[in-house]
Image: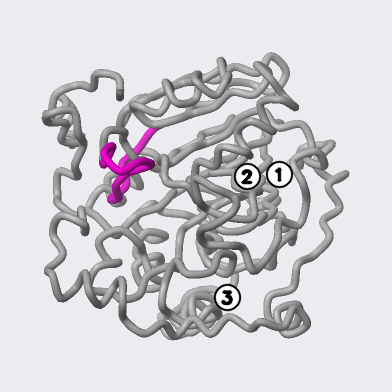
Amino acid sequence: MAEAAPPHCDSADGFIQPIFKDGRYSNPWGGLWHEEATFRERLKFFFGKSHANVPRSERELDETLPILQPDLSVFALSPETGVRHLWVGHATSLVQFDGLTLLTDPIFSDRKSPSQAMGPKRYRKPPCSIAELPTVDCVLISHNHYDHLDYNSVLALNKRFGDNLCWYVPMGVKKWMTDCGVQNVVECTWWQEHSHTRSTDGDFKFVCTPAQHWSKRTLTDDNKTLWCSWCVKGPNHSFFFTGDTGYCPAFKTIGSHYGPFTLATIPIGAYMPRATQSRVHTDPEDGIKVHKDVRSEASIGIHWGTFHNISKEFYLEPREKLKELVEQQGMSSTAFITTKHGEIVLIGANNH
């Protein structure tokens, strides 16, 4: 059972809070597609034709979506300026700046499912294993869906790092974490701030911020835990993890109060059919709106190109559509990019 949450209200400084009623959360501006979608929209989502066309050939996939072998030794020393980023796949990123190393929504398993014997499977494997990761200080969890909160990955990370690894989770998820044996957990609701102190590199501010999504892990626990995005403000740089979301008014508020950000990772995939998915998943066009709203200096597109059977758009369309829109809107070619699985990039170096 989820832990008690504060009642729905606007805080004194005007920040809107999630609705919490009868033990379940909802977005204050709507966006729960499984409650709001029409019967026809539901049929189209579950039974409509898929245009994903993921190649069966590993050779073709290696050409269109190559997996690079990352040199993880570079993470032994944090960059003096800028934010270092490695895309593991889907919404999982390894991020390092100002002496801190983070993981976002880690899933290293073959399937996003309660069982590794069935369920949506990877068509692009992780470029590294948990055993190969550098030392990780913190993990950001956006919500409890299986492709964002992966049981086997949580166990493996906890076994390797133990209480030295701090997990940041939205309301209601802490109990699940402690049931898995994880003890170092910080649980927050929207707009709560937490100071993370590092004796050598200065303090970091972690802020749990809104997203427009939903939660579920079992047949009966719909929305009993919260969903969120995360701001991480370091001594010299900052990072915004959007998590999983549809476009909503909260991003302008996040940008005005906590932006600009040196780097943001923003979902751009799993958006078709739009009639239902627009409520919970940003497409490249909405992703650009988030990028601008939160005042990100540079963004990387995530939540695409990794798992079978999670959406109906062509498997390369998120990358192609994003590049096309960036050009059409006259944005810098480096303002909002995608990267290869396993590719390490340094964003915002020498800008501070």
Give me the disc on residue 157: none
The three-letter amino acid code for the residue at tag 2 is: His
Does the magenta-highlighted stretch encompass residue 87? no
**Label 3, on which residue?**
333
Residue 352 in picture, x, y percent from top left: 63, 45
Colour convention of the picture: one colour
Judge whether 226 appears above or below 251 on screen. Answer: above
Residue for point 27% across, 45% down = 253
- Which residue shows up at 32% across the image and 47% down it? 211
Q: Nearer the viewer, mark 1 or mark 2?
A: 1
User: How far across and how far down the image is residue 216, in percent?
Assistant: 34, 43
Q: Residue at x 34, y 64 (%)?
A: 289
Whichever of callouts 3 and 1 sits on the residue coming sooner in the sequence is 1
Report the amino acid beneath label 3.
Ser
Left or right of 44 in this view: 126? right
Residue closer to the observer: 113 or 325: 113
Please give the residue where the numbered disc 2 appears in the rendered image.
Answer: 352
Please give the name of the residue rendered at 57% of the width and 69% of the height, measured from the top-left corner: 305
Q: Residue furthest front?
A: 117
Measured in 3D between alpha carbons, the distance from the residue under mark 2 to the one under mark 3, in whole angstroms, is 20 Å
Which residue is denoted by mark 1 in the rendering? 81
User: Does label 2 or label 3 sit earlier along the sequence?
Assistant: 3
